[in-house]
Image (cartoon, rainbow, N blue to C red):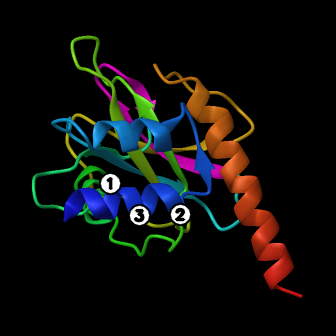
Amino acid sequence: MILDEAVADARLAAWEFDGARAWLEEARRHPMEPLAAEVWVTDPAFEHVLLVKHRVRGWVPPGGKVEPGEAPRAAAARELLEETGLRTELLPEPAAVAVRSYRADWSPTLGLSYAAIVGRDVPFAGEQNQPAAWFRLDTGWDSVFPEDRERIRAHARRLAAGRAVGSH
């Protein structure tokens, strides 16, 4: 079942925000709102993040709604491809799980964030009115989710530390 995959990935996520795991356990007892999935794409140096310009939310990681019958990881990969033209392997460990409202008139929903590492020289072929761009992690970007900046920075530092350990 798709919800079981979301729960499994939520348990594996490196970071948890907003009491997301407890929220998910409670939400399983009621009709579930749509799940969301996104990808935190960093460059191999872990100095940049790839974002897309959303017409309302500002600069955000590529992502969107998990379609009925679709696994969250597959939705994240699909959204990345649709919004940036990138087809890449997502890292095995989900980056984060969080609960947020994507619109004022929507109830809070669970969002799973996955991670990928992509070279900055790869060309984009995303959606027409939603450009993609690299942003330095040590700078800010305009977004309705300002907490994402530190969350993505922390995850990039964690990935960089893991790579440094693995390279010895």
Question: Residue at left 37%, top 23%?
Answer: 57
Residue drawn at (53%, 63%) of the image: 12
In this rendering, position of residue 25 left or right of residue 72: right
Three-letter code for the amino acid on which mark 3 is drawn: Ala
Residue 8's tag is 3
Measure the C-alpha gap from mark 1 to mark 2. Answer: 26 Å
Q: Nearer the viewer, residue 100 or 27?
A: 27
Q: Do labels 2 and 3 touch, CB within 8 Å?
A: yes
Identified by mark 1, the residue type is Thr
> Dot 1: what SS?
helix
**Image coords of residue 27 (percent x, y):** 30, 37
Between marks 1 and 3 in the image, the one whose residue lies nearer the viewer: 3
Residue topped by disc 1: 84
Residue wearing tag 2: 12
Q: Give the residues drawn in magenta, as a range.
A: 48-59
Numbered marks: total: 3
